[in-house]
Image (cartoon, rainbow, N blue to C red):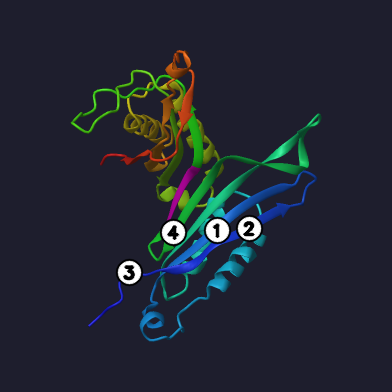
Amino acid sequence: MYELGANRYGKSRIRLVTVDRSMDRHEMRDLTVDVSLEGDFTAAHVDGDNTNIIATDTMKNTVYAFAREHPTGPPEVLGLTLARHFAAYPQVDRAVVTLRQHGWSRIPLASGGSPDAFTRSGDLTRVAIVAASAGGATVEAGIEDLTVMKTTRSAFTGFERDRWTTLPEADDRIMSTKITAVWGYGETAAEAGFDFDAAFDGARTTLLTVLAEHFSPSVQTSVWVMATAMLESDPAMDWVRMVLPNLHHWTVNLEPFGLDNPDMVYVSTTEPHGLIDATVRRSA
């Protein structure tokens, strides 16, 4: 005998650009949206009965239609509207909408930022993950692909050594990583009026400021220091998860060329890399 285990389905990588032309200064937003549904879809899997299936093409069209009503604003707000819409279907137990917002900046002119011309700013991707069910909605926000570097005030010493250990201890080293950080908001964030843009800007500012200012004895410590600072700065946050690859920079040996290398010349590597993944939450 067999039974169907956990399953979900949806539409991924729905590309969406909206432009609000209601004022002379246009507002543009660039999103990639994923929709995922969990619920009563067993018959489609085991019996070939599609009665309860909401077509993924319908999901795509719904995203476009709802974007017409919400052309600007935080991605979390559009995500809440979409997730609640899909969760209202009787066969859907849980709807999850993930939105990635791609950055654009106004082209600078002598008079200020252009009202209608933009350049892609690739420093990071803003992420919103909204889930809705009969029990309510949850909102997560975050950052992906934020590459940072500290050229000092980073070390790694005192780690365990065995016969396979060749890594020298470092009192002062380059620390570089590509930050993925996601944080969860409490129930109040799902209510009307929560300022997601201000919360996101505050989280990003805190993360980067603390990264720049603290001494890092390890990437693990940096996760703790940055995450606790973010929780301290925003009482609406319940937890912060960080996934940080340690992008190594190795000092180049210049002795074969008769040159010294007083920590000036490095080779940058991306593979293999260390990977640190940790969640910091408020204690009970």
Name the one closer to the observer, 170 or 90: 170
Q: CA distance from mark 4 to mark 2?
A: 20 Å
| Callout 1: SS | strand
User: Left or right: 67 with respect to 117?
Assistant: left
Residue where numbered disc 2 is placed? 16
Would residue 224 be visible to someone looking at this image? yes
| Percent of width and height locating residue 266 | 47, 25
For label 3, count other residues whose C-alpha is less than 10 Å away and answer few (under 14), some (14-19) or many (20+). few
Q: CA distance from mark 4 to mark 3?
A: 17 Å
Q: CA distance from mark 1 to mark 2?
A: 8 Å
Amino acid type at mark 4? Ala
- Mark 1 near mark 2, Cβ–Cβ under 8 Å? yes
Mark earlier in primary sequence (1, 3): 3
Quadrant in the rendering for residue 283: top left
Quadrant in the rendering for residue 168: top left
| Callout 4: SS | strand
Residue where numbered disc 3 is placed? 6
Mark earlier in primary sequence (4, 2): 2
Reply above or below: 54 against 240.
Answer: below
**Residue 33 image label:** 1
| Percent of width and height locating residue 87 | 46, 68
Image quarter (top left, top right, bottom left or bottom right) of the C terminus: top left
- In reply to whether residue 142 is colored magenta, the answer given is yes
Residue drawn at (44%, 69%) of the image? 9
Amino acid type at mark 1? Val
Residue where numbered disc 4 is placed? 131
Q: CA distance from mark 1 to mark 4?
A: 13 Å
| Callout 2: SS | strand
